[in-house]
Amino acid sequence: MPATAPVTEFELALPAARLTGRRWGRPGATPVLAVHGWLDNAASFDRLAPLLVAGLDWDLLAIDLPGHGHSSWLANGYSQAQHAAALLGLLDALDWQRVTLLGHSLGASIATLLAASLPERVQQLVCIDALGPLSAPPAQTASRLRDYLLAVQPGQRRPPRPLPSPAHAVRARVQANGLSPANARALVERGLRQDGDHWVWRTDPALTLPSAVYMDEAQVQALLAAVRCPSLLLQADPPGRFIAPELQQQRQACLPGLQTVRLGGGHHLHMENAHAAASAILAFVNKAESKA
């Protein structure tokens, strides 16, 4: 499969936010919305998207979530439900009535919320190294809410930390995420802006505030059980540290038809192992469409 394909920049002003992204494939083809992980941006799919549209007749839009990349910031904070609402507004504006969702990490969690709550709008679901949102025991609710309330008080929000050069940001992403320098550079180039003689992240600092409320595990598994479309999980091998293995197995069991493929490449396997990820997705889509 060729590793390159034409890409165009995307921008759309919605009532809640101005959303930007990158788009590959044929306009009018099968609509696919790709959603990146926390503190990443649409460049997360720079390697994977060209491989997918080379093998499938797709119109693939990788979006910058609100507060990320070139998209605008939200005035009232962020939650996964707010992100899902923004994406639903995007689908409506594009008149994409039924789509394939492709999500990595946080993006996979948001995609799961949409697939569970609006099954009539989601044709297929592809999750990369996440299946449903993180959960927390109910006993932690009060302390978690306290942390959130104290963090959002006026004057508590810190401005972005200045960086002397993009190279410093690349090294930080390599160290934090285990990315190759080339893949880290793709995220950094879209994620930084120059401010005088230094650089700052475009990402809204509010995204790093503690969440006010987490679902408990029973709620997460109930959401997963509500997903009706064909679903694929690309899981890092060895598994990541975000969810305990026994919980991961319970979640996978909530979707009886779920296909699971383990791939090397770490948490960002769609970037570090793009050809293998593309092959798994192509096989999944072709199998699902042959049964339709």
Image: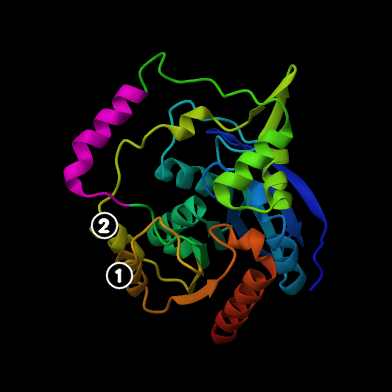
Secondary element at image label 1: helix
Q: CA distance from mark 2 to mark 1?
A: 10 Å
Query: In the rendered image, which quarter is residue 203 located in?
Result: top right
Q: Are marks 2 and 1 in contact (CB under 8 Å)?
A: yes
Above/below status of 29 relative to 191: below
> Magenta segment: does it hold 26?
no
Disc 1: which residue: 250
The single residue placed furthest to the bottom in the displayed view is 291
Q: Amino acid at mark 1?
A: Gln
Badge 2: how crowded within 10 Å, few (<14), some, or many (20+)? some
Badge 1: how crowded within 10 Å, few (<14), some, or many (20+)? few
Query: In the rendered image, which quarter is residue 219 located in?
Result: bottom left
Above/below status of 36 relative to 3: above
| Position of the C terminus by quadrant | bottom right
The single residue placed furthest to the left in the displayed view is 139
> Magenta segment: does it hold 140?
yes
- On screen, residue 186 versus residue 228, left or right, reads right
Q: Position of residue 189 (x, y in %)?
A: 73, 39
- Label drawn at residue 217: 2
Q: Position of residue 249 (x, y in %)?
A: 34, 71
Q: Amino acid at mark 2?
A: Glu
Kindly identify the residue that appears in the image at 29 percent across and 40 percent down.
213
Report the colour scheme.
rainbow
Q: Is residue 283 visible?
A: yes
Q: Nearer the viewer, residue 2 or 78?
A: 2
Secondary element at image label 2: helix
Kindly identify the residue that appears in the image at 73 percent across and 67 percent down.
51
State the extent of the magenta-drawn residues as a range. 135-151
